[in-house]
Amino acid sequence: MSKKCGECGTSNNDINAYCVKCKAVFGKNVAKTAAVPEKPAVEVHEKPVVAAHEKPAVDKPAVKVQKKPVVEVPHVNDKVIAQGADKAIEEFLSKDKIDLLKFKANYEILNNGTADQLSKPEIIKHSTSSIENLSPIVNRPIGYPTWFVAGYPDVVNWLIRLEPEKIEMIFVNFSENAMFDKNRLFNSDILRRIIGVYIESGNKLECGAD
């Protein structure tokens, strides 16, 4: 009997232990292993571990914060009352010929203390006598804006000392709502009325220009 080589197909004697042609050994299943090409290594990028309660950091674009320009209001001087001052205030001081040096000195005292405390020669020189009584804020009657007290301190002190019945005559034609502005201060009509009665009573404005 003969047997056929499984490798090359050559017939061999049954007693042969290997193929006479290709020398393949009979009785063993020798399989040719094909070379398997290696796969290229895959680079794995690990994600950072983020705790459950944390949010991953996100780079936000820088935000430019624009600061508001600081606007300085100049001191009152001989030429201007104040930059952007209310037109009504300017009309009051102009109409009554208020000395702006006196106005400025009185205004400084109302904001910072008495003339002695300020110890500035120009403040002591130009401030008026009536302002001393109104320097402590507790002595100032409610309803008057600060600029009015500075420009008309004698008028304010006069009204404080005026008899109740005469005060009523000043305000007789005004209802309570018509007397005050939105800030609950005397409006311009009331202030002008008070000044008018003061002058009609024979008084001269203390801060008026000499």
Image (cartoon, rainbow, N blue to C red):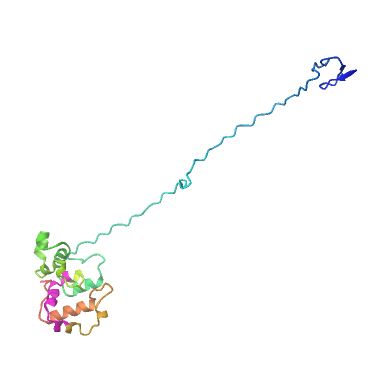
Residue 16 vs 72, above or below: the answer is: above
- What residue is rendered at 48% in x and 46% in y? 52
Tally of numbered discs: 0
Picture coordinates of residue 21 (x, y %)?
83, 16
Left or right: 54 in relation to 10:
left
Front position in the image: 78 or 124: 124
The N terminus - image quarter: top right
The C terminus - image quarter: bottom left
Whether residue 156 is in magenta: the answer is yes
Residue 22 vs 35, above or below: the answer is: above
Picture coordinates of residue 129 (x, y %)?
9, 69
Left or right: 143 in relation to 1:
left
Residue 180 vs 136, above or below: the answer is: below
Among the 4 quarters of the image, the one containing residue 6: top right
Among the 4 quarters of the image, the one containing residue 185: bottom left
Picture coordinates of residue 92 (x, y %)?
20, 74
Does residue 95 appear anywhere in the picture?
yes
Left or right: 39 in relation to 183:
right
- Give the main secondary structure, helix, strand or loop, of the magenta stretch: helix
Left or right: 117 in relation to 24:
left
Front position in the image: 24 or 200: 24
Picture coordinates of residue 40 (x, y %)?
62, 32
- What residue is rendered at 20% in x and 62% in y? 75
Q: Which residues are magenta?
A: 149-167
- What residue is rendered at 25% in x and 59% in y? 72
- What residue is rendered at 16% in x and 80% in y? 196
Residue 149 vs 67, above or below: the answer is: below
Front position in the image: 132 or 16: 16
